[in-house]
Image (cartoon, rainbow, N blue to C red):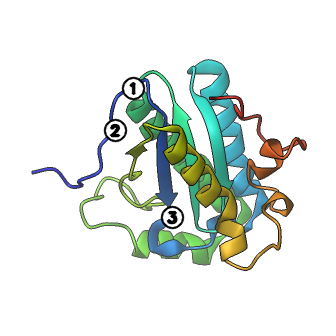
């Protein structure tokens, strides 16, 4: 029996995804850890032909819209690579409490690893219309606004809202997708 009702749809369509840290721990409140996400997305764009249309990195989760060959596999690789990289950085920097929490909240079926960074799944939703694409982009960009962190989505540096406003951002995204 499948663990989740969420499945990747047709490869040619963009997908809206959410990746959440276990127990909603605030891992990405540290810029070094958020930068691992950005670096990994750049790799996917440059080396794996993944197109990224929008993103936001919050303190404990991220939303992104992407398409490309073998997207499901690439998302799995992304989660594995980012978790390994961030856990190594935590160990090197002495983040003992956060590492203990990532161990404590590890799922019982994850017996082969000491820590778990990401919750299982990415909750992919296939985007099959221009209206749905805009709805997901706006949802993504307005996440920091809804949380009360900023008054304007373009003020959140870990978001593609700046790119859609014609401003420089931390990650190049494809804004001309229509």
Cα distance, mark 3 to mark 2?
Answer: 20 Å
| Residue denoted by label 3 | 21
In the image: residue 93, left or right of residue 120: right
Residue drawn 84% across the image and 47% down it: 165
Which of disc 3 and disc 1 is earlier in sequence? 1
| Residue 72 visible, this orientation | yes
In this view, the residue in front, 19 or 147, is 147
Task: Give the SS element for disc 2.
Answer: loop
In this view, the residue in front, 140 or 26, is 140
From the viewer's perspective, is residue 95 above or below residue 119? below
Determine whether label 2 and label 1 are within 8 Å by CB. Answer: yes
| Residue denoted by label 1 | 11
The x and y percentages for residue 110 are 30, 58
The x and y percentages for residue 78 are 52, 39
From the viewer's perspective, is residue 100 above or below residue 170? below
Q: Nearer the viewer, mark 1 or mark 3?
A: 1
């Amino acid at each position: 029996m499948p663990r989740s009702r969420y499945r990747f749809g047709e490869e040619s369509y963009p997908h809206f995804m959410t990746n959440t840290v276990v127990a909603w721990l605030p891992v990405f409140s540290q810029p070094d850890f958020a930068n691992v996400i950005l670096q990994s997305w750049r790799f996917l764009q440059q080396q794996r032909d993944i197109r990224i249309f929008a993103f936001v990195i919050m303190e404990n989760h991220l939303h992104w819209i992407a398409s490309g060959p073998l997207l499901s596999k690439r998302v799995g690789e992304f989660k594995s690579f980012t978790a390994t990289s961030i856990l190594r950085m935590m160990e090197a920097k002495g983040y003992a409490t956060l590492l203990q929490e990532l161990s404590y909240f590890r799922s019982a079926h994850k017996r082969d690893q000491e820590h778990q960074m990401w919750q299982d799944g990415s909750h992919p939703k296939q985007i099959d219309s221009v209206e749905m694409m805009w709805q997901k982009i706006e949802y993504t960009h307005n996440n920091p606004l809804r949380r009360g962190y900023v008054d304007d989505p373009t003020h959140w540096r870990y978001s593609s809202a700046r790119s859609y406003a014609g401003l420089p951002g931390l990650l190049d995204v494809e804004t001309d997708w229509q």
